[in-house]
Amino acid sequence: MHYRQMDFDGYRVYVGAVEAEADELAGAAAGYQAALIVSRPGAAGRRELEAYRDDSLGCGYRWSSADEALSYALTRAREMIRKRSPALRC
């Protein structure tokens, strides 16, 4: 798994690229699936609150490289935060 973390506009964003094997029955090639967690950091030592999680962004689409999957997940997170998506629970 490849992983990155960043802070963006009051949220903490974790993105990941998870290796996925080929699935011949489903017609899916090997590659990387994108994963995303968006959380709100807690104040004064309080625990982070998870605002959004998706372990298989893009309906499980497989990107050919980890960088492509990470880039997609990061773009999706920034878009959700900028638009204040209703999917964000906090």
Image: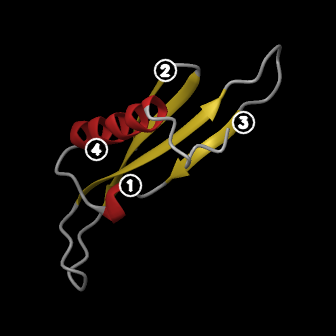
**Res. 49 mark:** 3
> Sequence-wise, which precedes: disc 4 or disc 1?
1
Callout 1: SS: helix
> Sequence-wise, which precedes: disc 2 or disc 1?
2
Say above or below: 27 vs 52: below
User: What residue is at 68 percent from the left and 24 percent from the top?
Assistant: 41
Q: Nearer the viewer, mark 2 or mark 1?
A: 2
Q: Is residue 21 left or right of residue 64?
A: right
Kind of residue sitting beneath label 1: Leu
In the rendered structure, are the residues bearing label 2 and label 1 in contact, judged by CB atoms less than 8 Å apart? Answer: no
Which one is nearer the viewer's eye here, 17 or 60?
A: 60
User: In whole angstroms, how far apart are the C-alphas of marks 4 and 2?
Assistant: 19 Å
Question: Which residue carries the number 1 mark?
Answer: 57
User: What residue is at 51 percent from the left and 35 percent from the top?
Assistant: 84
The spot of residue 28 in percent (x, y) is 21, 72
Kind of residue sitting beneath label 3: Leu
Q: Quadrant of the N terminus?
A: top left
User: In whole angstroms, how far apart are the C-alphas of marks 4 and 1?
Assistant: 9 Å
